[in-house]
Image (spheres, helix red, strand yellow):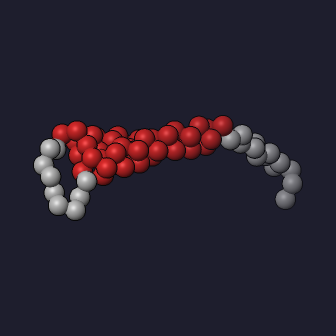
Amino acid sequence: MGIGLGIFLVVIGAVLAYGITADIAGLDLDAIGMIFMVAGVAVVVLTIVFMVVRRDRTRQSIRDDSDVL
């Protein structure tokens, strides 16, 4: 989900920054698009980092002592 959200933000940011040429009073669509693209890249990077950290965790094995009550 995180990688998909990041890619979505990058796409929306690219459309705002490069695809829309309209001028809206009070809004800088280029700046908003760049913010979305940076946020999307950050989401993708953080998601990948968290996935790698979660995978690298060592799991402790549970001992099965059926003799102990």
> Can residue 33 be seen at all in this image of the molecule?
yes
In this orientation, which residue lies closer to the viewer: 26 or 16?
A: 26
Measuring 30% from the left and 52% from the top, which residue is drawn there? Answer: 32
Percent position (x, y) of residue 5?
36, 47
Instruction: Please tell me which residue is depicted at 75% across the width and 42% down the height of the picture.
Output: 61
The single residue placed furthest to the left in the displayed view is 22
In the rendered view, does 21 fall on the left or right side of 61? left
Which residue occupies the extreme right position in the image? 68
- Image position, residue 30 (x, y; %): 27, 47
The answer to whether residue 65 is left or right of residue 21 is right
Which of 28/40 is in front?
28
Camera-side residue of 51 and 58: 51
Q: In what quadrant of the picture does the C terminus appear?
A: bottom right
Residue 2 seen: no
Number of numbered discs on residues: 0
Residue depicted at 41% across the width and 44% down the height: 38
| Location of residue 39 in the rendering, given as x and y in whole percent from the top left corner | 41, 48
Q: Quadrant of residue 14?
A: top left
Residue at 25% x, 53% y is: 28
Q: Give the percent coordinates (x, y) of residue 55.
A: 61, 38
